[in-house]
Amino acid sequence: MKRILFCLVALAALCACSNTPAPEVENTTLQTIMNRKSVRSYTDQKLTDAQIETLLKAAMAAPSGINLQPWRFIVVTDQAVKDALQGERRGPRAMYSDCAALFVVCGETTMTNREGVQVPNGNWTADCAAATENLLLAAEAIGLGAVWTACYPYEERISRAVEVLGIPEGITPFCLVPVGYPDGDDAPKDKWKPENIHYNRW
């Protein structure tokens, strides 16, 4: 045991003296990011209130322009409402109908400036995108599956969400995220492409 300890201390000293980086420590945050995948099939298992709140807290922890936090969320668990949002959008899987909970990420598209005048909020889509990514990563982190499905800027999808959910004027549905327990073996895609990277200038 003393010999092993001596070897470890010697190795650490050698690394320090030679500027050799220490062995990489496992990072669960990076693992979650790399393991995230789009999951479109779900079991019948429901989500708990605590799980739903965890996902929403993660979404709201996202950055936003001048901290306006323009995101608003509608959590749909009622089967009739999920079916209404699914509509004719069937495809190979009825994701909205089959998921345990459907998170509708919306954005407040106007803001009140210092003069008290309502003006367009040009950051709302970026802010909602950041919140959506946080939600997806949180789902991955707690063993759930989720997928980002676009709503904005498609007028037909926006209109359906507004009509079904009673979304008020000034609020625009940005995307719909079905969440549930994965029913399958979905795997993350390797999206690393060095050819897409430029340093210092194009």
Image (cartoon, rainbow, N blue to C red):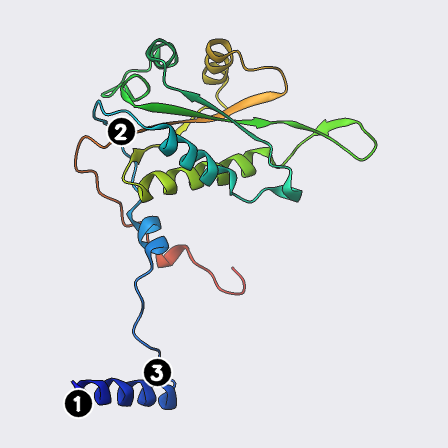
Q: Earlier in the sequence, mark 2 or mark 3?
A: 3
Determine whether label 1 and label 2 are within 8 Å by CB.
no
Q: Which mark is residue 170?
A: none
Q: Earlier in the sequence, mark 1 or mark 2?
A: 1
Is residue 184 at least partly visible in the picture? Answer: yes
Tag 3: amino acid: Thr
Extreme residue in the front direction: 2
Measure the alpha-carbon separation of dots 1 and 2: 53 Å
Element type where label 2 sits in the image: loop
Q: Nearer the viewer, residue 86 or 179?
A: 179
Q: Percent from the top left, x then y, of residue 64?
A: 59, 42
Q: Does residue 193 lie above or below 130 as drawn?
A: below
The residue carrying mark 2 is: 40
Measure the alpha-carbon separation of dots 2 and 3: 44 Å
Extreme residue in the right direction: 115
Measure the alpha-carbon separation of dots 3 and 1: 23 Å
Q: Is residue 101 left or right of residue 105?
A: left
Q: Nearer the viewer, mark 1 or mark 2?
A: 1
Q: Nearer the viewer, mark 3 or mark 1?
A: 1
Element type where label 1 sits in the image: helix
Q: Pointer 1: residues within 10 angstroms few (<14), some, or many (20+)?
A: few
Q: Which mark is residue 20?
A: 3
Q: Which mark is residue 3?
A: 1
Is residue 148 at least partly visible in the picture? Answer: no
